[in-house]
Image (cartoon, helix red, strand yellow):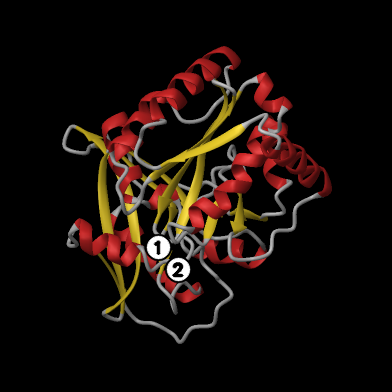
Amino acid sequence: MHASYLQKNQPNTGCSIEWNILSLKEWQERFDKIAQSNILQSYHYAQAMALTARQKARWGLIKINGVEAGLVQLLEAGVLWNLFHGVILDRGPLWFDGFGGAAHIKLFFDVFNQQFPPRFGRKRRIIPEIEGGATAHALIKQTGLLKKTEEGSYHTLWWDLEAEPTLRPNWRGSLQKAEKNLSLGEIRTEWDDQGKFYPDLRREYAQDKAIRGYGGASPKFLDNLARFSTKQNPMVIGKLSKGDVLIAMMMFLKHGQTATYQVGWSSDKGRHYCAHHLLLWQARTVLQAYGVKQLDLGGINDENNGLKKFKEGTGATPCALLGFYT
């Protein structure tokens, strides 16, 4: 869960980060205990990035006074025996229950800065998993991290799958339109967690991305994510068709108790039938069957206002993290 920096904790005297001491099974067992994780700290994300960008991953077990307190995953790249060295800590660390207060965050970054100090030749990128606000900014300033002024905050939305949804009226109207067409047999939906739908998704997404020129994950990176999909943490894909014609798809990645909306594609006809409203709504039930409690709807920004409004229409809770640091 992103850090509750207002949580009151007793003073702590010691923090350690023990790297690569856990087996994959041991890491996953601990990761599964975290109520609100994110894809950037998940094992299959690190493995996909290692193949895509030739980066190396580290998996850290955080201990406070000898007690297991959380997990952190880093990505690194280096040349000339790390004379030129890149360190990436995206949306971490993640904390176990009872940890993640201000004192713990300060202790963690004290150790992190000792192990990966700023220096000539080293480039650091850090997105702390801490929501913004005056108290949070004051806290992060104490850690010695420096804000990248050219980068803004990191915004996402959390959709609680266990709570009653509070759909906005226009979003609910689009969903009702799609559900009516579904009941009339105009359209149909199917779901897959075995990778059978992935080739279609990749083809349509890659073509759409090339034509429209938007950002987002590269097809190569999606290939590598698919490669590391497991039965425990599957890649879940929904598709919507009209007759035999595929008109929309969405991909979700499960990681522990949480899932992330990774990519979607829709044709003009899919947009006419409000396909993504229906697929995202059905995803709530589909993902709950895998034990998912929270859905991270993915980063949002003002550059893609249509996608932002679509995600906001679900009534999901906005989350603005502190942003990018070095």
Question: Would residue 121 be visible to someone looking at this image?
Answer: no
Q: Nearer the viewer, residue 322 or 57?
A: 57
In the rendered image of this protein, does residue 136 appear above or below residue 209?
below
Q: Position of residue 149 (x, y in %)?
A: 59, 42
Q: Residues within 10 Å of mark 1 (few under 14, many from 20)?
A: many
The residue under the point 74% across, 39% down is 180
Q: Which residue is mark 2?
A: 105
User: Could you tell me the amino acid type at mark 1?
Assistant: Phe
Mark 1 residue element? helix
Q: Which residue is mark 1?
A: 109
Residue 138 is situated, as x and y percent measured from the top left of the image, at: 59, 65
Marks 1/2 in contact by CB < 8 Å: the verdict is yes
In the picture as drawn, the residue positioned furthest to the right comes out as: 169
Secondary structure of the residue carrying tag 2 is helix
Name the image quarter holding residue 173: top right
Q: Amino acid at mark 2?
A: Ile
Residue 27 horizontal/vertical position (percent): 26, 61
Quadrant for residue 203, please give it: top left
For residue 270, say whether it is visible.
yes
Query: Which residue is drawn at the image coordinates 52% and 46% (left, top)?
Result: 324
Tell which residue pokes out farthest to the front in this image.
184
